Amino acid sequence: TASGARVYFVHAPSIPMLDLSITFDAGGRYSPPDRVGLASVTNAMLAKGVPGSDEAAIAERFASVGAQRSGGAGDDRATVSLRSLVSEPELDTALSMLERLLAEPTFPAEVLAREKERLVQSLREAQTKPETIAGQTFEALTYPGHPYGRYATPETVSAITRDDLVAFHRAHYAASRAVVAMIGAIPRAQAERIAERLTARLPAGSLPPRLPEVARLTQGVERRIEHQAQQSHILIGAPAIAWGDPDQF
């Protein structure tokens, strides 16, 4: 696009629908150590408010045209997705709302407080489960001192503020750091217009911070954790080959 986003499009005319996703270089690896969970919270809060519309109005807007919106954030990337009919005015209505969520989220403070409390309670429950304890321990041992080895806790989530969300969105939800993928019953010219429309008003963004390389483990480590569960969880592994390595394929 003119704003720097890469676009991938597949024309699929068999059913009158469009599946669209925008993936940003906005994953959890960019969350500060004392704000782990910031990437996920930012993504979840995109649909909680735009100027003139609260979360209920946003949900109703998508539902009124049969559109489905989803999203999420992992260690490396954050995604916002849309499934819509290609008929008008249904498609235009869904795209208009998606454009606003991406470009002008308000991150309402009262909703953020509610979502943080919900997430904190979920984390506290998860940290009683052996699979969660094992997974978090495994990642910390596999990626010592690296963002991949961190995980959200009630403390890091509680520390997140609305200003953190605004700054994270401004820095990382940029067109130059986005990939738009579309498959559906629309012609290429329309796909081009949609991609331009959804990325034109995104933040300017900033250069991503330089992350440390993933270090190879120099020796094996074994960690045994007592738990009252009747079933054992055993994880074995090490950092694998990196993306971009000539031998990766």
Image (cartoon, grey):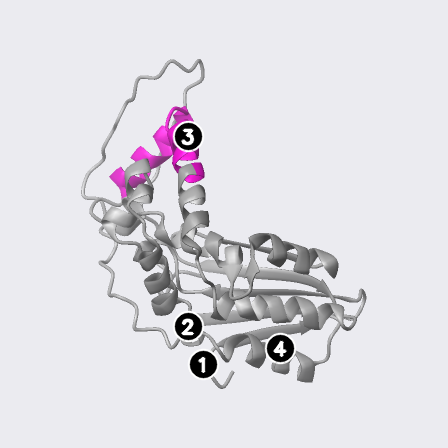
- Is residue 151 in sight in this rendering? no
- Indicate the amino acid at tag 2: Ala
- Indicate the amino acid at tag 1: Gly
Closest to the observer, 180 or 234:
180
Q: Range of the magenta residues?
A: 118-142
- Residue at mark 1 to residue at mark 3: CA–CA distance: 39 Å
Q: For numbered disc 4, what is the local secondary structure? A: helix
- Residue at mark 2 to residue at mark 3: CA–CA distance: 33 Å
Q: Which mark is residue 174?
A: 2
Residue located 66% across and 72% down the image? 10
- Residue at mark 3 to residue at mark 4: CA–CA distance: 40 Å
Of pointers 4 and 1, the one earlier in the residue sequence: 1
The reply to whether discs 2 and 1 touch (Cβ–Cβ < 8 Å) is yes
Q: Name the quarter where the C terminus is drawn.
A: bottom left
- Indicate the amino acid at tag 3: Ala
The quadrant holding residue 168 is bottom left
- Indicate the amino acid at tag 4: Ile
Q: Which residue in the structure is indicated by mark 4?
A: 194
116 lies above or below 81: above
Task: Give percent across and percent down for residue 160.
Answer: 32, 49
Q: Nearer the viewer, mark 4 or mark 1?
A: 4
